[in-house]
Amino acid sequence: MANSSKKPKVVLDPLFRKVEWIFSGDEFRRLESLVDVVWGKNEPMPEEELEKVKKEVFAVITGRWRYGEVAEMENLRAIIEVGGSPPPVDALDYETCFQRGIRVLSCAPVFGPAVAELALGLALCSARGIVKADSLIRSGEEKYSRTGNADAFSLYGKKVGMIGFGGLARSLKPLLDPFRPDYLVYDPWLPDSFLSRYNLKSVDLETLLSESKLIFVLAISTPENKGLLNRERLGLIKEDSILLVISRAHLVDFDALVDMVNEGRFRAAVDVYPEEPIPPDHPVRGTKGTILTPHIAGHVPEIYANLGPMIINDLEAMISGFPPRELRNVERELVNMFVGSKRYRK
């Protein structure tokens, strides 16, 4: 339990996010009523400022971990990342965190609904040819009625492949359910018994790619899945299908993707790229049969407003001796799945 006469110290150093994105005025006042906010600015916290409070800090709210050894933070109980991905294993000593019960909490759950919403929008735009129709009508080349729908199809009753069934896919599924799709899921992290709770069919990746009309890339990046969708596997996608790259470009051979959509092998919608910003001369900019958005899926301003209350709720729970319930707790078994330059070992 927290000492009623002294509030715990919490470092608020969210760069590259901004404090006002995460906490409204009312929420910031609520935070201050609960904890002693240290720093709380949009500039990076200087090392000398951290040194003043290092041994007293209860939690660190940060855009990326850059505070050295957690072993030196004697009172630390939580690391709350607001960047979108847990710290890589070469930046944070996870073993010390696990041994001391320091929670490493990810803000990923706040972005899931917004990313799922854009994923559905891209699927509809691509399947129904909405972006293409807009372009044609502006150039005076539009085709009306049935003629203008020659390449379009309805989402109803189609086979939908999901590569990964984590938090993002679980946010997307309720949006797709009204279309009554036949889901095919590839996720080697999850047993069939888990997927069966959602009435989902587990298949191998090759089956998913060759049979699905819509293929959503929804998995997180791991060292093992880099380039998972290589040229050979992309070649399994049917000509009239759509590949939607939503979570991470890390999983896709982008050179092969560019070649194949230009050849008319399949259509694609892409929100994430191997390099961001995309270089001006990157060939993906000139691809035919694609819809391209600049990594905007999760970054809706009002979504950030949901993050502040989640952080405060979890801080309040932990200060009171209860586990956090809002943010995603990094689990020991999954640490090695995160992309980092060296492996975590017990």
Image (spheres, grey):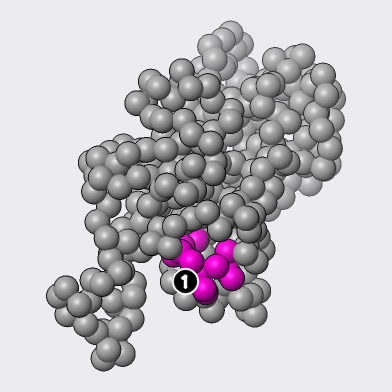
Q: Reply above or below: 103 against 85.
A: above
Q: Which of the two residues, 269 or 338, is positioned nearer the viewer here?
A: 269
Q: Residue at x 38, y 41 (%)?
A: 172
Find residue 297 and report its horizontal and vertical position in percent: 46, 54
Image x and y of residue 243, in percent: 47, 56
Residue for point 84% across, 30% down: 69
The residue under the point 16% across, 73% down is 146
Looking at the rendered structure, the secondary structure element under dot 1 is: loop
For image coordinates 70% across by 15% down, the residue present is 101
Looking at the rendering, the stretch of residues picked out in magenta corresponds to 257-270
> The residue under label 1 is which amino acid type?
Gly
Q: Please state the horizontal and vertical placement of residue 190, each as a whole percent of the image.
A: 54, 25
Q: The C terminus lies in which quarter of the figure?
A: top right
Q: Quadrant of residue 258?
A: bottom right
Q: Which residue is mark 1?
A: 264
Report if residue 37 is visible in the image.
Answer: no
Q: Is residue 184 visible?
A: yes
As rendered, which of 124 and 104 lies closer to the eye?
A: 124
Is 194 one of the magenta-colored residues? no
Percent from the top left, x then y, of residue 141? Answer: 27, 89
Q: Is residue 259 magenta?
A: yes
Say if 290 sits above or below 103 in the image: below
Left or right: where does residue 50 sit relative to residue 84?
right
Quarter of the image where one finds residue 79 = top right
